[in-house]
Image: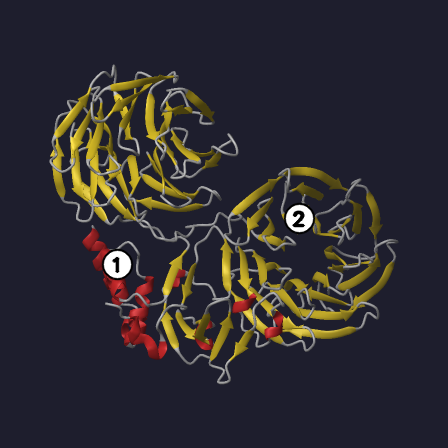
């Protein structure tokens, strides 16, 4: 199967356009080869300076090594030096394997029933095994000889573990007890009782002062080694706990159970565990990655799952086993995982140094509205899936989901202090959500049609809403009272916004007009006419002197607030303009359209500065971050995408705020040099900014150089797009460390 995969990969590559091109392009396309083929791994070792290609749905479906063990594998462990693997099987044997080649090194015989658990001592000298024959056996690693048989158990031994100081062994039994043994003498030191059903898993803390155990009684218990006292009883699982373990610093405990969940307990802060979902079968084994914030689990569904246990992000799924995976372990260098399965194999998997999320779980329908928190750390989105969701800007991890609307969420916004989120929906309600309490706080009712748009006043004292019922309504946040109903539009109100001084409200409507209102009195101050189709979006500049509007006539228009004069008409979109917003310094406008693009405009000249392509359906909402460094967009393609303006070629460096280090352009215009504390990066401008052709070639922004070919299925995003939140996969290419162009020969690193 492995050979067939290699042959297939080679055949696919040989038939690609890259194979018919110049050598450096041929070599650069190696970056897109499947990461799980041995052929790929070998070639990439020789060409380490090719571009870096990543894909959000990339999976390692084939392990590095597959070892045929001959019978169901119940337990596995790595030696501390990573050179050997030990496995226990239902055939009553303990087997030792070469971790690099998979060669069988030794077969340790002595048990008279299934071996349920195995462990290496920290010094690598001994192996301990626990069996259904009611014994624990200690073996010499070098000689393969049986050194001791620990007798005294009254029932099946389910789990064994060495202490970090190699002085003790703990065993967990079907008879509900834990037993602690002296390794050198074989003497039973303590019997720990407290569980009311079978003990399935045991582990020592790194300092050898505590033991953790998991049981069929659904509890995780922590014990003092020296006294045998029960220190904690951790409850949270709803079924048998099959596996437990300590983190390296002993701060966290992880547990896996038959209820298909993994729980992580912070022993210093809270007794309430973090719940990690993903497996679709009983979780049989769990382990912490050393010196990392990652956890791996093995499940009866035949999969291994990886998480970041601090954020709860689901990082990866390793598939390949045909039946239940019963046991897993990390190598000490955290570069490999070993797994044992009922499919009678032991498999070794490569662990990427920086594991990327395979899929960011996004909205399940069109994303209609997006917004930044004032500190720029969070994004809020509203969707036709009836939910409001909050995301971490740096990682794309979903932080919160607010449910309550019974129809499409059309508009969302953060309050200035970041405590509140307001949402408007086709269910005719406005809802306020408290970020601190993570729940719905208020429901504002009064509109007789779908609520299309909502916005906070600057001081977050008021909310303004626009509706299909042709009205603009103003609300008091503290009392939830409706303060005013602004009437004048003759068709649906699609968009509303407060001026920064909170004196004015602007609204855009299907009646093709933009209207300005006195926020205090509700008096209509002006009607701005010029659009020839429905006005979909309106926004004030920060100084409240200008208004920008976007329309179904495919244009943006800029207006003078005081006079109502039309200052400019911005043309470029080829379909309806759904969303518009000013940058914080009011020098730029960003727009989103039914033509699937996000566009950036210069306010003073009306010049189109850039077209951002990446969405595959209508862009419904756009906004700038407060520091102007990012643009976020929401689309009917069900994704939220964030664009880094630093990587967008505007030819106007003034978009960057004073918080960014100086940027200089070399006189020959071929390189951009960015100066920071201790590093200087020099990369050809034409390579830093590139375009993707219809034939899947990545070419320089000037169109002069072919840089790399990528498969169409990769769905590669533009370089300025540095975060995508979507249920669907996407790819990205990084040329920063690659040797391309005239330097291509340096990509070879033997």
Closer-to-camera residue (482/287): 287
Q: Which residue is mark 2?
A: 418
Task: Name the element at disc 1.
Answer: helix
Closer-to-camera residue (615/269): 269
Question: Residue 316 location in percent, x, y?
Answer: 38, 47
Q: Is residue 341 visible?
A: no
In the image: residue 140, left or right of residue 743: left
Numbered tag placed on residue 746 in the rendering: none
Tally of numbered tags: 2
451 relative to 243, above or below: below
Question: Residue 509 location in percent, x, y?
Answer: 74, 59
- Location of residue 594 by image quarter: bottom right
Question: Residue 68 location in percent, x, y?
Answer: 17, 40
Image point 19% across, 36% down: which residue? Answer: 125
In the image: residue 197, left or right of residue 622: left
In the image: residue 355, left or right of residue 496: left
Question: Residue 89 location in percent, x, y?
Answer: 20, 31
Q: Is residue 180 visible?
A: yes
Image point 82% across, 69% down: which residue? Answer: 564
- Location of residue 327 by image quarter: top left
Classed neighbour count for the residue bearing mark 1: other residues with Cα under 10 Å, few (<14), some (14–19), many (≥20)? some
Separation of residues labelled 2 and 1 (CA atoms): 46 Å
Classed neighbour count for the residue bearing mark 2: other residues with Cα under 10 Å, few (<14), some (14–19), many (≥20)? some
- Location of residue 495 by image quarter: bottom right
410 relative to 198, above or below: below
Q: Quadrant of the C terminus?
A: bottom left
Q: Which residue is mark 1?
A: 41
Q: Earlier in the sequence, mark 2 or mark 1?
A: 1
Task: Name the element at disc 2.
Answer: loop
491 relative to 423, above or below: below
Q: Residue furthest bottom?
A: 668
Closer-to-camera residue (194/635): 194
């Amino acid at each position: 199967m492995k050979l067939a995969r290699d042959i297939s990969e080679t055949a696919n590559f040989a038939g690609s356009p890259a194979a018919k091109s110049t050598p450096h392009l041929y070599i650069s396309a190696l970056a897109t080869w499947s990461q799980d083929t041995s052929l790929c791994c070998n070639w990439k070792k020789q060409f380490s300076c090719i571009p870096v290609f990543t894909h959000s749905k990339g999976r390692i479906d084939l392990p590095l090594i597959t070892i045929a063990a001959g019978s169901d594998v119940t337990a596995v462990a790595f030696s501390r030096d990573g050179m050997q693997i030990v496995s226990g099987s239902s055939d009553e044997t303990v087997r030792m394997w070469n971790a690099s080649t998979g060669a069988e090194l030794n077969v340790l015989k002595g048990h008279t029933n299934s071996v349920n658990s195995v462990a290496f001592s920290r010094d690598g000298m001994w192996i301990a095994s626990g069996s259904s024959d009611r014994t624990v056996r200690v073996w010499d690693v070098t000689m393969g000889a049986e050194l001791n048989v620990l007798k005294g158990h009254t029932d099946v031994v389910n789990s064994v573990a060495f202490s970090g100081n190699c002085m003790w062994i703990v065993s967990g039994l079907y008879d509900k007890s834990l037993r602690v043994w002296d390794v050198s003498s074989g003497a039973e030191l303590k019997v720990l009782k407290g569980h009311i059903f079978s003990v399935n898993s045991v582990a020592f803390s790194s300092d050898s002062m505590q033991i953790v155990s998991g049981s069929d009684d659904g509890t995780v218990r922590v014990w003092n080694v020296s006294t045998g006292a029960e220190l904690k009883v951790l409850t949270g699982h709803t079924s048998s706990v099959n596996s437990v373990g300590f983190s390296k610093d002993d701060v966290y405990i992880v547990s896996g159970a038959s209820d298909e969940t993994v729980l992580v307990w912070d022993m210093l802060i809270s007794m309430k565990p973090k719940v990690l979902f993903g497996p679709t079968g009983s979780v049989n084994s769990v382990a912490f990655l050393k010196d990392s914030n990652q956890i791996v689990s093995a499940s009866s569904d035949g999969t291994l799952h990886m998480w970041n246990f601090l954020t709860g992000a689901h990082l990866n799924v390793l598939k390949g086993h045909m039946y239940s995976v019963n046991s897993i372990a990390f190598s000490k260098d955290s570069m490999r995982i070993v797994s044992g399965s009922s499919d009678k194999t032991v498999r070794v998997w490569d662990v990427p140094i920086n594991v990327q999320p395979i899929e960011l779980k996004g909205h399940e329908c069109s994303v209609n509205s997006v917004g930044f928190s004032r500190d720029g750390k969070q994004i809020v989105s509203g969707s036709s899936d009836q939910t409001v969701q909050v995301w971490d800007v740096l990682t794309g991890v979903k932080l919160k989901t607010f449910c309550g609307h019974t129809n499409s969420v059309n508009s969302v916004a953060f309050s200035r202090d970041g405590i509140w989120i307001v949402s408007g929906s086709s269910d005719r309600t406005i809802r306020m959500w408290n970020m601190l309490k993570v729940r719905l706080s208020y429901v504002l009712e009064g509109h007789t049609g779908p609520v299309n748009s909502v916005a906070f006043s600057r001081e977050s004292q008021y909310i303004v809403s626009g509706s299909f019922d042709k009205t603009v309504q103003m609300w008091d946040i503290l009392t939830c009272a409706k303060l005013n109903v602004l009437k004048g539009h003759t068709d649906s109100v699609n968009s509303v916004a407060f001026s920064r001084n909170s004196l004015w409200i602007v609204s855009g409507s299907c009646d093709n007009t933009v209207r300005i209102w006195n926020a205090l009195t509700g008096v209509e101050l002006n009607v701005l006419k010029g659009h020839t189709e429905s006005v979909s979006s309106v926004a004030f500049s920060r100084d409240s002197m200008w208004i920008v509007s976007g329309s179904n006539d495919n244009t943006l228009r800029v207006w003078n607030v005081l006079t109502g004069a039309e200052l400019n008409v911005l043309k470029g979109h080829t379909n309806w303009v759904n969303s518009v917003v000013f940058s914080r310094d009011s020098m730029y406008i960003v727009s989103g359209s039914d033509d699937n693009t996000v566009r950036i405009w210069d306010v003073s000249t009306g010049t189109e500065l850039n077209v951002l392509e990446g969405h595959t359906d209508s862009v419904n909402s756009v906004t700038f971050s407060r520091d102007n460094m990012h643009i976020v967009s929401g689309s009917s393609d069900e994704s939220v995408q964030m664009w880094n303006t630093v990587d967008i070629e505007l030819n106007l460096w003034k978009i960057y705020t004073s918080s960014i280090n100086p940027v200089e352009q070399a006189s020959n215009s071929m390189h951009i040099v960015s100066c920071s504390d201790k590093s200087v990066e020099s990369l050809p401008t034409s390579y830093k900014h590139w375009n993707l052709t219809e034939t899947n070639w990545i070419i320089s922004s000037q169109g002069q150089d072919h840089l790399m070919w990528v498969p169409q299925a990769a769905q590669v995003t533009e370089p300025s797009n540095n975060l995508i939140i979507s249920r669907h996969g996407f790819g990205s290419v990084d040329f920063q460390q690659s040797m391309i162009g005239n330097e291509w020969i340096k990509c070879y690193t033997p």
